[in-house]
């Protein structure tokens, strides 16, 4: 079986680059190369496929390399392309990837799962009525990699809202999701598989001299990570059960990461599901350093090598497609 590893320039920093090109190091190739090496270590034949602006050139590369399955898909555009040409790929389908944070939150609410209350602002001149409890948190509706997130995104009074909404709507070019800022412990739960999902160790993100997980804080590995996070057995059961319910409710496939805040009331509040979660682990000798993926940290805590971890995800896709 030949597995093609997609890589796309600036994939992790494309939204942040709309604000500034400072501190936006592009490690997209290095990230893809690490996955390529992991697949080779797992016993698969693999090749690197650069996502090109002309999708027909990408298709030509896939055909020339005789690719059976695509790994490291990282955008809705790529998924639309793969489904159009009926090419199997690892990860969640277009029905989940195409819906934004608000639709996902509405699905979660409909299924009686906890998530912060919210409203949407489409521009800074038309802020909707805010019937929410302060502090608030404002973020891009379709953001990734903590793009556009700084400490100013935590809102304590209504006068702060227009400036942050403008940053998101005018510069990043997305609607702004305004939700209640739940004070508590930020955690993320990685899950792999589809028919038989496996929940990885819970990872807690402790902030290092910030009040939230800003772009610089996250992308330059300034967080203090605890994996496995310290919870009582009962707390851990509730968190994992909630994460698994979310994973199944949203019909995630092969792998995803569920971001949550454990409020002071002990409730795990759903923030977002990351269908393009970072899987990178520590670079091997001679390889360039890449941003450490949260799911990569979880896999390390579970005792996986990178080959074993990536293989477990790929096997889920192989089973789904009956390859």
Image (tube, rainbow, N blue to C red):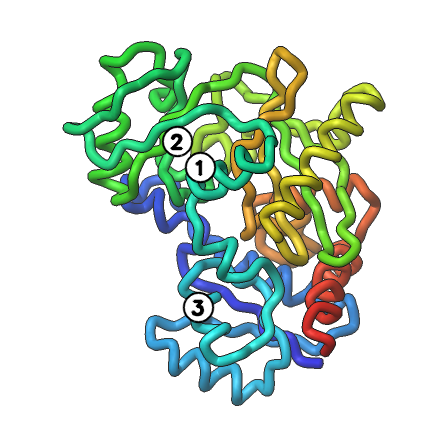
Q: Are marks 3 and 2 in contact (CB under 8 Å)?
A: no
Residue at label 2?
149
**Viewer-side label of 1, 3:** 3
- Give the spatial CA distance, label 1 vs label 2: 5 Å
**Quarter occupied by residue 81:** bottom left
Residue at label 1?
146
Q: Is residue 15 at least partly visible in the picture? A: yes
User: Label 2 neighbourhood size at 10 Å, few (<14), some (14-19), many (20+)?
Assistant: many
- Give the spatial CA distance, label 1 vs label 3: 24 Å
Q: Along the line of sight, which residue is nearer the eye, 226 or 93?
A: 93
126 relative to 234 in the view: left or right? left
Q: Earlier in the sequence, mark 3 or mark 2?
A: 3
Q: Under tag 2, what secondary structure?
A: loop
Residue at label 3?
80
Q: Residue at x 48, y 66 (%)?
A: 79
Q: Earlier in the sequence, mark 1 or mark 3?
A: 3
Q: Quadrant of the N terminus?
A: bottom right
Q: Quadrant of the C terminus?
A: bottom right
77 relative to 249 in the view: left or right? left
Q: Residue at x 23, y 40 (%)?
A: 171
**Viewer-side label of 3, 2:** 3
Q: Are marks 1 and 2 in contact (CB under 8 Å)?
A: yes
Q: Under tag 1, what secondary structure?
A: loop
Residue 117 vs 276, above or below: the answer is: above
User: Label 1 neighbourhood size at 10 Å, few (<14), some (14-19), many (20+)?
Assistant: many
Q: Along the line of sight, which residue is nearer the eye, 75 or 297?
A: 75
């Amino acid at each position: 079986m030949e597995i093609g590893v997609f890589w796309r320039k600036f994939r992790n920093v494309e939204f942040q680059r709309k604000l500034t090109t400072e501190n936006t190091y592009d490690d997209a190739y290095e990230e893809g190369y690490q996955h390529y090496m992991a697949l080779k270590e797992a016993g698969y034949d693999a090749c690197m496929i650069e996502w090109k602006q002309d999708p027909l050139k990408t298709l030509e590369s896939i055909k020339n390399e005789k690719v059976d399955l695509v790994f490291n898909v990282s955008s809705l555009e790529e998924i639309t392309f793969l489904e159009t040409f009926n090419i199997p790929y690892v990860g969640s389908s277009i029905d989940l990837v195409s819906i934004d944070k608000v639709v996902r939150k509405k699905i979660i609410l409909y299924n009686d799962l906890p998530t912060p209350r919210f409203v949407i602002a489409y521009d800074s001149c038309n802020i909707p009525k805010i019937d929410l409890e302060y502090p608030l948190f404002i973020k891009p509706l379709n953001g990734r990699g903590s793009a556009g997130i700084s400490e100013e995104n935590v809102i304590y009074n209504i006068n702060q809202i227009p400036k942050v909404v403008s940053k998101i709507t005018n510069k990043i070019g997305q609607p702004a999701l305004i939700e209640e800022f739940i004070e508590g412990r930020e955690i993320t739960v990685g899950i792999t598989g589809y028919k038989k999902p496996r929940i990885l160790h819970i990872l807690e993100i402790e902030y290092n001299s910030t009040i939230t997980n800003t772009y610089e804080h996250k992308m330059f590995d300034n967080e203090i990570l605890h994996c496995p996070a310290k919870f009582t057995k009962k707390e851990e059961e509730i968190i994992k059960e909630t994460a698994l319910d979310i994973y199944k409710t949203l019909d995630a496939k092969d792998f995803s990461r569920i971001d949550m805040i454990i409020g002071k009331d002990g409730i795990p509040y759903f923030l977002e599901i990351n269908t393009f979660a970072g899987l990178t682990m520590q670079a091997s000798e001679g390889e360039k350093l890449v941003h450490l993926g949260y799911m990569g940290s979880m896999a390390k805590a579970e005792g996986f090598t990178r080959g074993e971890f990536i293989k477990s995800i790929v096997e889920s896709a192989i089973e789904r497609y009956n390859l």
